[in-house]
Image (tube, rainbow, N blue to C red):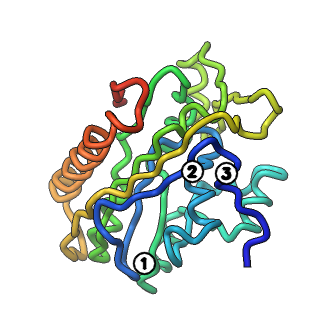
Amino acid sequence: MKFLEIDRFFDDYTIEFDENIATEKTLLAVHPHNAVTCGLTVNVYNGKLGNILVCASRMLLNTPLLGLAHKLSGMTSVDPSNLKVQMKKKRNIAILPGGFEEATLTTPKENRVYLQRKGFIKYALRHGYKVHPVFIFGEHKIFYTMERFEKFRLLLNKLKLVGVIFWSRFGIIPECKNEVHTVVGKGIQMPEIAEPTDQDVDKYHAMFVEGLKEVYNNHKAQYADNKNLKIY
């Protein structure tokens, strides 16, 4: 039983599905990351995504206080060894492919996504998962972020260090005067390939990128104040 309806914290909060998600072998690839990814946290807490396991960076999970909070919420590591275990169990999984880079690039001025990671596609292919592109409109405005020294902060990411500095009027409590709208796009069924080639991964990653852009373009008129999506 939930003791707090945290979605009421925001001015408006919705979630919609372009297609229902299955109860197993589903991977939700969520963008944008932002500093905390409040939209995903709210959706998981309220059970809007069913019985789903959120996988995050080991570095994040080892961060003092914040990492402990994530672990207590049931979040687990996105490390390949753990993904292999969870996918063998056919668990539904949510990941944030944009990682630290997408968090570092976040600005309330526009929607930005970092789409250079492809490892999640390789694992989805190995286990025959269905991958749904997910976009959270309004996520980029939940915190203010420092935008200077971008190249240096991205360099920190290469060293597996956090490169985002964020704040709100209330410290690290999210800005409540915002709307958060999550859209779960249509899934891309991956064929089960024990050893996918680079060409296989590139092919299905390109399909994912197009799927994410389709989610954004189909819903931006309703939910996005700045209509452009900047892709890195």
Q: Which residue was labeled with disc 2?
A: 39
- Dots 1 and 3: beta carbons under 8 Å? no
Tell us which disc is closer to us: 1 or 3.
1
**In the rendered image of this protein, does residue 24 appear above or below residue 189?**
below
**Amino acid on which disc 2 is placed:** Gly
Label 3 secondary element: helix
State the residue in front, 4 or 216.
Answer: 4
Q: Earlier in the sequence, mark 2 or mark 1?
A: 2
Return the x and y of residue 27 as percentages of the image width and height: 39, 67
Task: From the viewer's perspective, tell me whether residue 164 is left or right of residue 182.
Answer: right
Return the x and y of residue 131 as percentages of the image width and height: 31, 64
Return the x and y of residue 170 as percentages of the image width and height: 82, 32
- Tag of residue 87: 1
**Amino acid on which disc 1 is placed:** Met
- Tag of residue 59: 3
Q: What is the distance, in whole Å, between disc 2 and disc 3 at their CAs?
A: 21 Å
Tell us which disc is closer to us: 2 or 3.
2
